């Protein structure tokens, strides 16, 4: 393909993307296909000779789009939001055009240096302790990793290798594997599955401690577990706390966890994948309490900060602890500025050797949106979630399961778990909105998260109307099946008559 | 930013990329900046209010481009090639426009299913044993990982966890950490640094066995090491063989390694990051010998197959061995088709939870280039490397260090290491071409790799002329400094008089 054909193809793809995003609200958010649908639509081998690019674009409509769950749709309310923005898409286009691999500083200085610049911009925007800045004289700084999973694994492995070195010096008679076998990590039972997986991958025992009634891990809970382990001769290694847990967006108590970690020399890592962006808002300054006690933290720019997936920021207070653990430098990566400057060789801060020029999409996004725009975007999500919360509170057939937190509302229809599951199945079957369930102990509930590229009040209203009407259906089925229900729920089962406090009647989805 | 501004911005970015790639040959391949250059060119904080996108594009020229090492330039000869192509850039643009995260099948079925389709296309194109195909009834299949590093680490960690389970059953009295402490991995001292790093990250002893005189790891070398370890009560775990080593693109002896691995129940992984693409060529069918004995293998589509970085294919003969090791499934990822179909949940095959829709760029590239086009592209690189090899052989001041292999030529000026280093410094200083050095034992040499997006014969000729002329300079300096040199080298030190066998006089770089 020559450059001129590329210009034509790429510009038509730009229009395809713009049209897709402008109209994604009108699609069913969930696809209507069965597993294996695609294998029947495509040939079994790649073509021998080139096909025309127009045929490929046509197949985006014929083959790909019918199999998409539309994360950019405002009717997406599952998982956590995955951000995207027009400037970020352009930023990554430029990254792909240049197509450098940032193996080292010399492998493309701009790739390393722009990452240093934007990670400092971001640390200031989030008001992180200054030890996390590259421009601070200390050994700290930020890096862009691919995912929260990788960031957490990096922290755990670095802590592990540091502990092995430390204990080996103190107890030369112990083997490295003896030491590793005694290491214990801690997190809460509310943390993301990638935390448990990090324990498996890092071959370190991971205790998922039961969070308190507010879904929070506290210093008290941690200290009890630590003392028990110390009694058994084990070595407390790392605590992975969460700001914005996956289930309910709860915030672990960083100040008290930090105090315990300092006392017992435990690495404190904070996974702020979802909630980290809120550090930027004055009204959430309490979320930053205790960050000065933290050794490392991560948060996802692809959640609230309008940068396309994948883009996970990670900060280290002392990057040498990671570099020292992971560095295996061969001659072919040496260059003349090696070690002579403050520019980091980020390959030692991460798992893979190669690195995309991800800083480019961050830079293009932040410059064209601006700090004010980013803060307004986060606040919009919070306001929309408040709107949904009010809907839930105004309908006595539903109950909140946890406090609304940022853009997430956790709720359920009153009654047993089966009703929650039935409601979810009903909603999923209809494909108009997409929610997922979570559970705490034995209690199942639904998570309603504000997602999509450009969510609006009308989308929240649409979702609530859909949820109400589908609860009607579930309750009617229960009634017809003679299922015993709480009388006060059944008496209100027709939502058509339930008006929502302080809101205009909900408009129909224009479809 | 609204959709129409995006159309305008993105289309201008498309032109920027096309212009960049059309003219990249004319830039110095290495940048003329000092570490920290960028921090002085950009503000210390992100802007409060939006800047115009045109200013950002202008800054691509003012701040980013001067700091690039141009991987897409045909004057890039360092590391290994990093592929890119126009259709691949468009494919990733579409991926970013859709911006889904493939957490599970239901999170966007097309994301999982297209990956199944293209990985089978690729397995057939490369003529891999059919056990590696998803469409085969067995438990094997292919996945797109971010990098060779991740693929190798996944294989090592899965092998480790499988071994722990196996030994724990046989010896319940052993603790898991006791078992892990006895595990030993093997690779050659010629393997990529990420292999050594995988040992560190996976906390498994990694023996980098000395390769033979042809830089090859053989079954014989492996078996000796295995027997020694068995004698000491250790547990041989995994052998990571390489097809296309980083230093010289040597091919480890897979059939003999495979036989030893079968005998001692060792997981055989093949890192074919660079050379894997050559499986597709009939004249390299010998490279596929022994692949039926392999448990897992990886190769980079972003090397020869014209797909943009990052895109690393990995195949497993029995994916359950990885899934069984890594699966930590929480309720929020469950969906109704879970476990009911042959569609893999790729999150269990990899380190991170999230996944980009990378299959899209592969699909767009393969369809618009076609199998014939891909094979022709690989062969072009081989032919260009042969051309360079002939230049080296025709000038008696140089020597080959290993056989030319695919697109890589390893050579050096005859004489001591200092001369090689001086020549490299001279070339790097002038920034016209970019090579790196490698070493074997104490012998330093230069690696000349055919890279860039569209390398041509004239680029190879240009590079050779540059190398010859800079050796002249080095030899002259040595002469003036009274350094003792081999007489037969000195007598030929002026390359202007040396004609290259069977080639026309080398043309000047048009700049």
Image: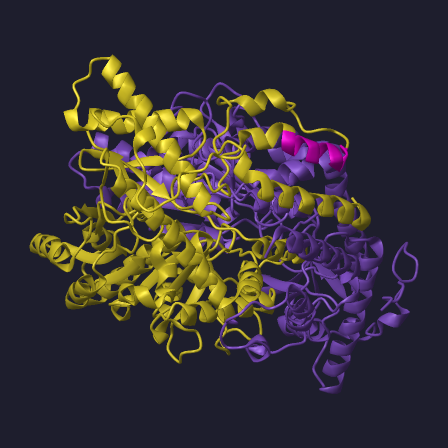
Chain colours: A yellow, B purple
Taking the view exactly as shown, the residue that stands out farthest to the bottom is B481
The answer to whether residue A390 is above or below residue A38 is below
Instruction: Name the side, left or right, on which A365 lies relative to A380.
Output: right
* Residue ID at (79%, 61%): B23
- Does residue B126 show up? no
Residue B434 percent location from the top left of the image: 69, 65
* Residue ID at (34%, 61%): A297
Residue A424 percent location from the top left of the image: 33, 29
The answer to whether residue A44 is above or below residue A253 is above
Q: Nearer the viewer, residue A475 or B332?
A: A475
Q: Which residues are magenta?
A: A50-61
Q: Which corner quadrant holds the N terminus of chain B?
A: bottom right
Residue A6 belongs to magenta span: no
Taking the view exactly as shown, the residue that stands out farthest to the left is A231
Q: How many marks?
A: 0
The answer to whether residue B434 is above or below residue B38 is above
* Residue ID at (68%, 29%): A46
Dominant SS in magenta? helix
The quadrant where residue A241 appears = bottom left
Q: Nearer the viewer, residue B296 or B218?
A: B296
- Does residue A374 show up? yes
* Residue ID at (77%, 52%): B454
Residue B386 percent location from the top left of the image: 78, 50
The answer to whether residue B199 is above or below residue B297 is below
């Amino acid at each position: 393909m020559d450059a001129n054909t590329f210009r034509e193809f790429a510009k038509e793809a730009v229009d395809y993307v713009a049209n897709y995003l402008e109209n994604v609200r009108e699609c069913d958010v969930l696809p209507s296909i069965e597993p294996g649908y695609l294998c029947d639509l495509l040939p079994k081998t790649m073509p021998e000779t080139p096909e025309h690019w127009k045929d490929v674009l046509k197949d985006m409509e014929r083959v790909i789009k019918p199999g998409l769950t539309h994360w950019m749709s405002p009717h997406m309310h599952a998982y956590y939001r995955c951000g995207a923005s027009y400037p970020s898409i352009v930023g990554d286009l430029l990254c792909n055009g240049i197509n450098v691999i940032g193996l080292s500083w010399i492998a493309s200085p701009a790739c390393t240096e722009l990452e240093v610049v934007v990670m400092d911009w971001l640390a200031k925007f989030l008001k992180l302790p200054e030890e996390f800045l590259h421009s601070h004289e200390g050994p700290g700084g930020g890096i862009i990793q691919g995912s929260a999973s990788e960031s957490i694994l990096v922290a755990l492995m670095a802590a592990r290798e540091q502990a092995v070195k430390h204990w080996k010096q103190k107890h030369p008679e112990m083997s490295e594997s003896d030491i590793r076998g005694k290491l214990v990590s801690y997190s809460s039972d509310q943390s993301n599955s990638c935390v448990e997986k990090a324990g498996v991958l890092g071959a370190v025992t991971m205790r998922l401690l039961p969070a308190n009634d507010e879904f929070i891990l506290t210093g008290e809970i941690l200290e009890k577990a630590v003392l028990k382990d110390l009694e058994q001769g084990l070595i407390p290694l790392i605590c992975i706390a969460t700001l914005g847990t996956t289930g309910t967006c709860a915030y672990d108590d960083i100040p008290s966890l930090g105090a315990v970690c300092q006392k017992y020399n435990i690495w404190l890592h904070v996974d702020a994948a979802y909630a980290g962006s809120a550090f930027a808002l004055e009204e959430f300054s309490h979320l930053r309490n205790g960050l000065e006690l933290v050794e490392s933290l991560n948060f996802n720019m692809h959640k609230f900060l309008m940068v396309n997936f994948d883009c996970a920021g990670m900060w280290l207070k002392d990057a040498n602890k990671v570099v020292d653990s992971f560095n295996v430098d061969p001659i072919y990566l040496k260059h003349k500025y090696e070690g002579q400057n403050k520019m980091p060789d980020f390959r030692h801060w991460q798992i893979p050797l190669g690195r995309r020029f991800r800083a480019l999409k961050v830079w293009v996004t932040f410059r064209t949106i601006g700090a004010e725009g980013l803060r307004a975007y986060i606040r919009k999500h919070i306001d929309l979630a408040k709107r949904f919360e009010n809907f839930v509170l105004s309908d006595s057939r539903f109950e909140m399961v946890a406090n609304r937190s940022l853009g997430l509302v956790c709720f359920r229809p009153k009654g047993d778990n089966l009703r929650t599951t039935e409601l979810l199945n009903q909603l999923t079957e209809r494909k108009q909105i997409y929610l997922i369930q979570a559970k705490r102990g034995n209690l199942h509930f639904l998570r309603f998260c504000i997602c999509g590229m450009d969510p609006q009040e009308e989308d929240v209203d649409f979702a609530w109307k859909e949820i109400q009407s589908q609860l009607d259906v579930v309750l009617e089925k229960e009634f017809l099946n003679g299922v015993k229900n709480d009388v006060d729920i059944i008496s209100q089962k027709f939502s058509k008559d339930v008006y929502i406090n302080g809101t205009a009647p909900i408009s129909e989805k224009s479809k």
